[in-house]
Amino acid sequence: MADELLVFEQTVEAVFARGLHGRIPPSCKARLRQAGLDLELKLRTAYPLDAWMTFLRITAQELYPDEPLEQGAFKLGEAFIDGFHETLPGRAVLSLLRVLGPRRALMRTTKNFRAGNNYTESRLEELGPRQFELWMNEVGSLPTFTAGILHAGLRTAGAADIRIDLSGYDHHACTYCISWSEASVSSGVAGKGDSSAATRSGSIISL
């Protein structure tokens, strides 16, 4: 793993310039500016992981003040996928996920996340049909942000009724217990019992 953990510009852009476009209030922008992210200026090429976690924490508090921080962070993870889809590389990656289907999409976790940072490593264990354990070496102080990315990414890949449980989180690494009930027939893993379309439903168990 790299000595300095960095989150690349395209990740920050996907969340703040794309996924949350028009939704960030002045109070949030002011707090972000004080923390080192000025949304009125050109983004830097990379930000330290700790700073990135601070940006996400501030934004979750500002946009979802009546919800637990973990759930707000989860929603920001979903917003990342929404915003990533609006970028040229994002359209290519997410189109590929639709072809691969959920199972093979999970197999690309390290490669996909490394497009946005310099530190992600992962291990995937298949426990049964549509049931996996995904270990990731570093998810920062908001593991549910990554859970939101995984949830939205799997939904894009054709999974439905997605469930993500968190276990073994040690403030760096985390294991995500992932399952879904069915997959779209348009996905690469469609088979017996698959539905004709994925839904947005799913669940996450907070720490």
Image: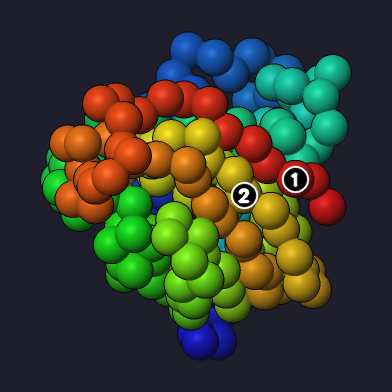
Residue at the image point whose x is 46% and y is 72% from the top: 126
Residue sitting nearer the eye, 131 or 53:
131
Amino acid beneath label 1: Ile
Color style of the picture: rainbow
Residue sitting nearer the eye, 111 or 42:
111
Image quarter of residue 198: top left
Image quarter of residue 104: bottom left
Mark 1 surroundings: few (<14), some (14-19) or many (≥20) residues within 10 A:
some
**For the residues bearing labels 1 and 2, Cβ distance under 8 angstroms:** yes
Whole-angstrom CA distance, mark 1 to mark 2, is 7 Å
Image position of 70 (left or right of 101): right
Q: Name the residue under label 1.
A: 205
Q: Can residue 170 be seen in this view?
A: yes
Image quarter of residue 192: top left
Amino acid beneath label 2: Ile
Q: Which mark is residue 164?
A: 2
Secondary structure at badge 2 equals: strand
Image position of 183 (left or right of 29): left
Mark 2 surroundings: few (<14), some (14-19) or many (≥20) residues within 10 A:
many
Residue at the image point whose x is 75% and y is 65% from the top: 167
Q: Which of marks 1 and 2 is nearer the N terminus?
A: 2
Residue at the image point whose x is 53% and y is 26% from the top: 201
Residue 19 drawn above or below residue 98: above
Residue 60 drawn above or below residue 113: above
